[in-house]
Image (cartoon, rainbow, N blue to C red):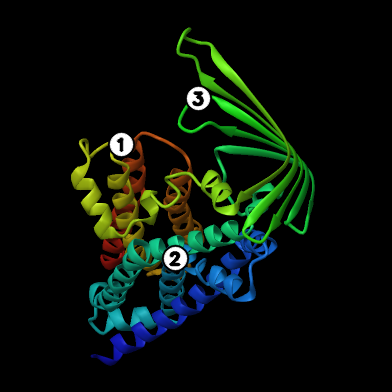
Amino acid sequence: MPILWRYLIKSYFQSCFLCIFAFIAVLLVIRFQGIALFVSSGAGLSSVGLFSLYQIPYILPLAIPISCLIAAMMLFQRMSSSLELTALRASGIGLSPITYPILVCALILSLLNFTIVSELTPIARTKAKNLIYKIASENPLIALQKDSILDVRTVEFDVKSLHLGKKAKEVLCVFRQGSSDRIGIFTAKELSVNGDFIQGTSISILSSAPSENEEGYDHLIIENQKTMQSNKSIATQTLFSSDWFAREDLFSFKHLLEKCKTESSLLTSGCFLELIRRSSLGFCPFTFTLLGIAFGTTIGRYRRKMAVLSAFSWAAAIMVCFVALKTVQKSPVICFLLYSIPQTLALLYSLKSLSLSSKGVE
């Protein structure tokens, strides 16, 4: 390997890894609320440590591309300001041989990022959900907390007081009855966890049953009990829906491909959209490195004042699409376009900028 390549690769990776560690620290602080909610659910120290560790694969697919952008831009800005780039070009070395080793490293990081987002992140998500499921199985009353780690969409709670997450008073629960559109109401003066059971006092349950005689009219069922005792597993099954572990973002790349083969319409398939998202996010380190090289290279006497702003504007546009489209329900076609178009435009713009720089055009 030429000395120049070793110098470029070493400088690039030093800045890149330093930025990655910094982003992990910063983004872990951002995810601190979720970790704090997990701690408040009564998890042990080892479970809290594992849950915190499982947050890192969430962070890396976003941290690696931004770190690549910063590392490439810092390297080529420094080489431009210290006239190293000018000296190399004056000696007959073009921009292509200079950028080649950095782009090869960026491709390696893209492969690593794709592996993380396609294989490691789903595993971490599943294990984190398993920890939450385990905690909820041991103490289902944590769902009654005002800010709970559980994302319960089929049940709504209101509670007057909750003592140490194990004893609740004046509980009101509104729940969906199975797969029907009807709802039921559950009230209790007090609920507590005792061993493998949930105990309650002054229980009232209001539910309905479909009428076989007249359509649109239900039989109203009212139950009152002075005391009640139920196994915790029944409450756990009520809290967690059947699709708790069946979301596309929990599947490995292999399982996503297999599920795509069974879909009747590929363009409207959620699995296909998830494949596109992972592929685009995996390729981001290469795109962002090329952006850093293009906007970090200066061939004139004066530094380009808007280069940093332009580079980070492109990066922000790409990242906003990844973050926003994951939470907003849109047409699969629109999602596909917004995943692919910003990154494609950034690549083309970077290649054009480097082509002009190699010809001596500022």
Residue at 44% across, 46% down:
326
- Left or right of 358 on screen, residue 183: right
Viewer-side residue, 295 vs 202: 202
Disc number lying in front (2 or 3): 3
Q: Type of residue at label 2?
A: Ala
Q: Earlier in the sequence, mark 2 or mark 3?
A: 2
Residue of label 1: 333
Q: Give residue 37's quadrant in the image.
A: bottom right
Q: Earlier in the sequence, mark 3 or mark 1?
A: 3
Instruction: Give the Cα distance between marks 3 and 1.
Output: 31 Å
**In this rendering, is residue 48 above or below 89?**
above
Instruction: Give the Cα distance between marks 2 and 3.
Output: 34 Å
Q: Give residue 99's quadrant in the image.
A: bottom left
- Does residue 280 appear in the picture of this structure? yes
Which corner quadrant holds the N terminus? bottom left
Q: Type of residue at label 3?
A: Asp
Q: Type of residue at label 1?
A: Val
Q: Earlier in the sequence, mark 1 or mark 2?
A: 2
> Can you give x and y, in whole percent of width and height, for residue 274 in the image?
33, 49
Residue of label 3: 181
Residue at 29% across, 92% down:
3
- Left or right of 132 on screen, residue 213: left
Do the numbered discs 2 and 3 sit on residues whose CB atoms are within 8 Å?
Answer: no
**In this rendering, is residue 184 above or below 282?**
above
- Does residue 362 appear in the picture of this structure? no
> Can you give x and y, in whole percent of width and height, for residue 66 in the image?
46, 65
- Give the secondary structure at mark 3: loop
Residue of label 2: 124
Viewer-side residue, 190 vs 108: 190
Residue most extreme to the front: 226
